[in-house]
Every structure is written in C-alpha cells, then in structure tokens.
Amino acid sequence: MPSRQHSPMSHSARLRRAEALNARYEGSQPWEIIERVVREEFPADAAVISSFGEESVVLLHMVASVDPTTPVVFLDTGYQFEETLAYRDRLIETLGLIQVISAEPDAEQLAAEDPGGLLHRRDANFCCHLRKTLPMLRAVRGYGALLTGRKRFQSTTRAALPLFEVQDSWIKVNPLALMSRQEIEAYAELHRLPRHPLVRQGYRSIGCRPCTVPVKPGDDDRAGRWPGLEKTECGIHFGAPGQPVRRASPQRQDGR
C-alpha cells in the first residue's frame, strides 16, 4: 500500500489533543464517536485496526454504518485460523466494507528469521514482532488516527483504557472502551450480526493458531492467548515502534 501523508504533529500536541478529545466525547455513544472521528476530527486520516475476531463485528458494523469506505487493516500473520479468514470474508460481504487492507509479514524477513515456522515456540515476542508489529506499522503509516475495538472488560491490563490515547505517531481511538460484555452481545443480537464460529468452542480472544486456546470459565477474555507466558499484547496494538524487540537467548536442549 502506498505511503500516505498527513499533517505532522508533535508528541506533546498529540497528547493535548487526546486529552481534549476525551473531555469532548465523555459520555458520548460509541457510534457518535466513530462518526465524529471519521467525518470531522480526522477526515480521510483515520483507519480501523481489526483482528476480525470474536467481537470485531460490533465495531465494524458501526464503522460501516458511518462510512463503509473507511480503511480497515487486517493482520494476516500466516497463522490465522481458517475460521477467522472465512469470517473476515463473510463480514466484508455482509457489512459492505469497501477497503479492507491485508497487512502481511515480509517474506524475506520470515525466511531469514523463521525458516522453519517454529519461532513462536522459542521466542513468542520476536515472532509477534516479525508477523504482527512490523507489518501493522507499515500498513498504518501515514494515518493520523487508528480506531480499535478494545474494551475495558477484556482484561485487567485494559481496565483503565481511555476513549482516546497517544501511541507514538498515532492517536488511538477506542470507541467501545466503556461498553460491557452484555452491551456488546445485545448490540450484536439486535442487529443480527454473524458471530465468529470459534466462539461456540470456548474461544473469547482469537489470535494465531499456535498461541490461542479456549478460555476457562471465570478467566479474562484474553487468558487464552499465549498460555503459560507473561505476555498480554501481540503487536496489533503496538506500544513503542521505535524500540526494537530483542530475541531471547536460545535455550540449550537440556533447558538450562
């Protein structure tokens, strides 16, 4: 995708604008925030980041209702569930999404760093860096605002998620942040939106096949991601693009 250009803004200016936006839209409905962001606050300068996961349909339905030409960036790591790819295609058709962009890892980088496709077993962070963070950064370069479907109820690490925040060169917009699980489910039922087929199998947060398992009752939605690892985010919602991810030291065969 060709690089886009938008008006440069200093980090301090972005922080001030995010603070002003949080004050301006406090108490607003999610669809109102989306409409104002897409049409007034960041016209032709906003994109949606979507995993096309278990709850993505609510944000995508709201965005499509406002402007179906809004760019939607989908991260295709090469390890997506087949059900996720089929669900993506179904939502594109059902919602009438016009511009869904597939962000994919660089083939040469994968050949050099992960020739056997088993990097996720040795170093999950570096695998996410190659397959998620770097492709996403390339895909969203040039946009000023990025809309996400993150919500506070999903995990303890997202419990204080604001409507607007600053991450590096972007203002991240989280219009669904304050919605409860019940409100998400009620919205999907009201509009008869198709659900991700893996939800019926106990998946509450769906990422790559090798690193995702069903969630146990009572656990956070994201407890099924990277089970056994102290890892909570994958790279779709990158934190500090300027800081390279270092590979872990290779382990000996005896584990020492």
Image (cartoon, rainbow, N blue to C red):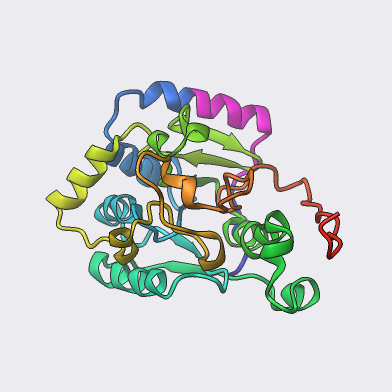
Please say if 155 is above or below 226.
Answer: above
231 vs 243, left or right, is left
Query: Where's residue 97, x and y in %?
Result: 32, 66
The quarter of the displayed image where residue 61 is located: bottom left
Q: What residue is rendered at 77% in x and 46% in y?
A: 243
Going by the picture, which residue comes out furthest to the front? 254
Position of 103 relative to 22 (above/below): below
From the top left corner, tell me how far across and down residue 245 is, in percent: 77, 51
Label the magenta part by its dominant secondary structure: helix
Q: Where residue 22 sits in the image (x, y, percent)? A: 44, 25
Which residue corresponds to the image point at 33% horizontal and 52% vertical from the top-left? 55
Is residue 81 visible in the rendered image? The answer is yes
Q: Is residue 110 left or right of residue 29?
A: right
Identify which residue, 142 or 96, lies in the foreground. Answer: 96
Which residue is at the far top? 23
Span colored in magenta: 7-19
